[in-house]
Image: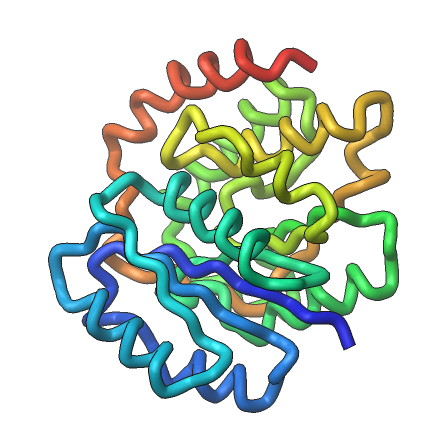
Amino acid sequence: MQKVGLVVPCYNEADRLRSDDFVDFLTTHPQYQVLFVNDGSSDATHRVINKLATENPNVYALDLPANQGKAEAVRSGMLYTIEHWDLDIVGFLDADLATPLEEILHFERLMNQHHQYHLVLGSRWKRLGSKIERSTARHYLGRIFATVVSLVFNLSVYDTQCGAKLMRSQHLAQVFKEPFISPWFFDIEILCRYRQLFSGKPVDDWAAEIPLYVWHEVGGSRIKAFDFITAPLALLKIRRSYPS
């Protein structure tokens, strides 16, 4: 049985962290380990995640001294897993569980069946049989953003920004070695770094998207309208840093 680690970045999540859901999932799936990364929270997040870690052998807590943004929280967590754990697969997902933990099992199953995939991305594709709950405005903003990303980076990816991804541990040290340029669009940088590693190979040779069955929008998103306004500049910086 493969060992799987999940990094969960947390910033002021004390009131909405669904601790019982994590505990129930880990009880049923003991091959998983969860690392909560406290990104310099000003609320009781430190206390909540450290209590979870004390009471559950498959839960760990990492406290960053100051708020550094989601990208660095994820990067710090991934590097921690490389240094301290012996895992086959490592991924990350949002603390609010907009993507339910059970969805990750589909990611893992796909990677077990197709060993060529080093990266599996969740995709919030609303279709018959799925339960994707997202506001109309955010849906269309997301489609515009995805189209721009596809054109600028030549990446045929439906949803780069879904907060759930799994990766094989083999190349994690290289992918997460350097800090990311953007605190919010680092998912694109992850794809660009993998593309550099697999230079000459089509993206669908080493990565796959898997449509989520369930996803629900949770209030309190850290991404604001200003982030969308400044997105073109951020994408330009990323594009210049990762020539294809």
**The C terminus lies in quadrant:** top right
Q: How many marks?
A: 0
Q: Position of residue 239 (x, y in %)?
A: 55, 15
Q: Quadrant of residue 107?
A: bottom right
Q: Residue furthest front?
A: 84
Residue at (46%, 43%) from the top-left corner?
75
Q: Position of residue 129 (x, y in %)?
A: 65, 70
Q: Is residue 195 above or below residue 72?
A: above
**The N terminus lies in quadrant:** bottom right
152 vs 175, nearest the viewer: 175
Q: Is residue 165 above or below residue 201?
A: below
Residue at (49%, 64%) from the top-left corner?
99
Q: Position of residue 238 (x, y in %)?
A: 50, 19
Q: Is residue 63 left or right of residue 186?
A: left
Q: Is residue 199 above or below residue 158?
A: above
Whether residue 124 is visible, yes or no, is no
Q: Is residue 95 left or right of residue 90?
A: left
Q: Quadrant of residue 171?
A: top right
